[in-house]
Image (spheres, rainbow, N blue to C red):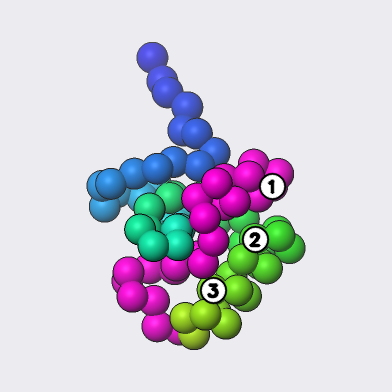
């Protein structure tokens, strides 16, 4: 019996499946999401990365990519992306 990984996984473990990467999302309290690498080719996700670069440069306080938007906005935007 197998299982299917969701498109976006909210995880607390350090295990990231091959083909995915972690981002931290939130305004005051950050939440970790694991998203498919294929998102890097999506213009909408690239806009989010540009905003992260403008706000944090290449120094991300959480140790990973930090996206400066609310969790609800992030989930709404990524739900519109194709994998």
- Which mark is drawn over residue 45? 2
The CA distance from mark 2 to mark 1 is 8 Å
Nearer to us in this view, 46 or 76: 76
User: On the image, which quarter does residue 48 sit in?
Assistant: bottom right
Q: In the image as oriented, which residue stretches furthest toward the top? A: 1
User: On the image, which quarter does residue 7 sit in?
Assistant: top right
Give the class, few, some or many, for how many residues have Cα within 10 Å of label 2's Cα (few <14, many ≥20): some
Assign a secondary structure to mark 1.
Answer: loop
Q: Which one is closest to the eye, mark 1 or mark 3? A: 3
Left or right of 1, for residue 38:
right
Q: Which residues are magenta?
A: 58-82
| Residue positioned 45% across, 58% down in the render | 26
**Residue 75: image location, x then y, percent:** 57, 45
Q: Earlier in the sequence, mark 2 or mark 1?
A: 2
Assign a secondary structure to mark 2.
Answer: helix
Check disc 3 and report the residue beneath it: 52
| Residue positioned 34% across, 44% down in the render | 11
| Residue positioned 37% across, 58% down in the render | 30
Left or right of 14, for residue 59:
right
Check disc 1 and report the residue beneath it: 81
Left or right of 34, for residue 53:
right
Assign a secondary structure to mark 3.
Answer: helix
């Amino acid at each position: 019996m197998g299982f299917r990984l969701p498109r976006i996984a909210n995880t607390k473990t350090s295990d990231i499946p091959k083909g995915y990467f972690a981002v931290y999302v939130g305004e005051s309290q950050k939440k970790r999401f694991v998203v498919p690498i294929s998102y890097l080719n999506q213009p909408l996700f690239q806009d989010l990365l540009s905003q992260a670069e403008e706000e944090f440069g290449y120094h991300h306080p959480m140790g990973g990519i930090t996206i400066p938007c609310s969790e609800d906005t992030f989930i709404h935007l990524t739900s519109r992306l194709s994998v």
